[in-house]
Amino acid sequence: MKAVFARSPFDIQIRELEPRQPGPDEVLVRVRACGLCGTDLHFARDWQGEHQPLGHEIAAEVVEIGRGHVPYKSGDKVIVEDLAQCGICRHCKSGRPYLCRNMYDLKGQPGMAEMMTVNYHLLEPFDAIDWTHASLVEPMAVAYNTVLNGRIPLGGSVVVMGPGPIGLMCVYLAKMRGAEKVLLIGSSRKRPRGRARLEAGVKLGADAVVEALETDPVGEVKKVFPEGADSVLVTSAPKTLAQSLDMVRFGGTVSFIGIDLGGKNTVEIDVNKLVFGKISLIPTFAEPAQNFPDTIRILRNGLFDASLLVNRTFSFDELRDVFMASDSGQAPILKAVLVPK
């Protein structure tokens, strides 16, 4: 079977591996779709260690069941989580599963593969969703977690920084959670990807968009929200975090999920703005997996139009070209999904 690994600079390998037979409490699945995440691009562009397995936005079909009481059968449609809480540690049993450090994981297997063998605790069943659209379950859950940490009040004001797939879904979910007005900040419309992202943001509910490279984004936010926004959701690079503190209102919340693996993860912020402005800054990390049942329901019930986001599918043969196009921004790719043949 084919399986994808990468390290910097875009040294992408498609290896031929033998699928492992499922052991006790394990399931062999056939990957039907796996989304290309921004983290995969970070690994391909910046990762300096051994080749990193790529892909964790996985929709799959059960092929074979191992020994034990496994509540699945051949043919079942499942989302494969990359990390699932154990359910038995002190954090899980105290109502804080997001703090679990004893998790089930993929054991170094890439989701960008033809098959995987995983513990059944990593599976979430679904139906009535297209395979490629089902690959949005994981990133939508990440966006949902970001929105929840943003503490958006009913009728509240929201700024979303970064119009990538997570940011675009944050726009939609913020409106679903009761925001009255959402402003989306991107870099520029000059490149095809930037233009496509901002246009998609409007379709997904953004009331206004701002091009940060063409204007003063803080000034534009203050034109829309003179006192600052109730909530700022930062899905863009760490360097943008300082600006978010000038966009949020007194007593507001900044939910931050942007990362960098290329040495730009250390940033300077004015702590006085946090203290004297009574601003809550909440780093958001959506692992172990949270809220998958909710995002499955959103997609299954047609509440989110996945076709507005998934606009490119690709095979293993096209993989490197899609990675390069997604990184450069020279193609209007919003969300690319690998469909193994």
Image (cartoon, helix red, strand yellow):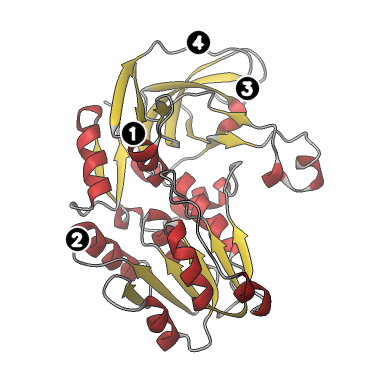
Residue beneath the point at 47% across and 52% down: 140
Q: Callout 4 environment at 10 Å: few (<14), some (14 to 19), or many (20+)?
A: few
Residue 270 placement: quadrant: bottom right
* Residue 214 drawn at (x, y percent): 26, 74
Which marked residue is nearer to the observer: mark 3 or mark 2? 2
Disc 2 marks a residue whose amino acid type is Arg
Q: CA distance from mark 3 to mark 2?
A: 48 Å
Q: Nearer the viewer, residue 216 or 253?
A: 216
Residue 174 visible in image: no
Q: Earlier in the sequence, mark 4 or mark 2?
A: 4
Q: Describe residue 290's horizontal placement relative to residue 93 as left or right.
A: left
Provide the secondary structure element on which disc 4 rests.
loop
Q: Describe residue 214's horizontal placement relative to residue 142 as left or right.
A: left
Q: Earlier in the sequence, mark 3 or mark 4?
A: 4
* Disc number for residue 70: 3
* Disc number for residue 21: 4
Identify the residue under disc 1.
Answer: 8
